[in-house]
Image: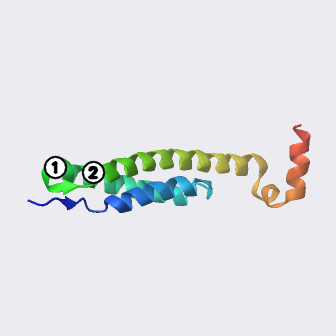
Amino acid sequence: MEQQKLPNATLILVFGIISIVTCCCYGVIGLIFGVIALVLANKAMKLYAENPEMYDGIQNVKTGRILAIIGVILNILALAYFIWAISFFGWETLQDPERMQEILEQYQ
């Protein structure tokens, strides 16, 4: 019997990479890609566990899952940082570079 690729194995890997790369986009975009990659990876791993000799590509799924976990953690940290910055400095201050410079000079 010929092995077939696990469904979405490459997509999981790509989404895991995207979740890490986009962690500086306010933590939202990468979080979405990371969660989708984790859901798809869990489905693929469950499918593989049921019939391992039938499927190939589990390494891509495992790597994508690890990258997605790292991406989700980084995105949660980035999102928390941006929420803290908005609550501490205020949205208007973050939009005004001169005002932001004044505030940062006070802390030096």
Q: Amino acid at mark 2?
A: Ile
Query: Which residue is more in the foreground, 99 or 36?
Result: 36
**Residue at image x 66%, y 51%?**
82
Give the Cα separation between the discs numbered 2 and 1: 9 Å
**Left or right for 50, reference 86:** left
**Residue at image x 42%, y 54%?**
35
Q: Amino acid at mark 1?
A: Pro
State the residue position of label 1: 52
Asked whether the residues under the numbered discs 2 and 1 touch, taking CB atoms below 8 Å apart as contact, a structural biologist would say yes
Measured as percent of width and height from the top left, residue 92 is found at: 80, 59
Q: Quick one: which residue is furthest to the top in this view?
A: 108
Identify the image's colour scheme: rainbow, by chain, secondary structure or one colour: rainbow
Query: Which residue is more in the foreground, 60 or 47?
Result: 60
Measured as percent of width and height from the top left, residue 39 is found at: 34, 54
**Residue at image x 44%, y 50%?**
68
Quarter containing the N terminus: bottom left
Residue 80 shows which numbered tag?
none
Measured as percent of width and height from the top left, residue 80 is found at: 61, 46
**Residue at image x 46%, y 59%?**
33
State the residue position of label 2: 58
Quarter containing the C terminus: top right
| Secondary structure type for disc 2 | helix
**Left or right for 17, reference 27:** left
**In the image, is residue 104 above or below residue 29?**
above
| Secondary structure type for disc 1 | helix
Sequence-wise, the earlier of marks 2 and 1 is 1
Circle 1 crowding by C-alpha within 10 Å: few under 14, some 14–19, many from 20:
some
Q: Quick one: which residue is furthest to the left in this view?
A: 1
**In the image, is residue 84 above or below residue 21?**
above
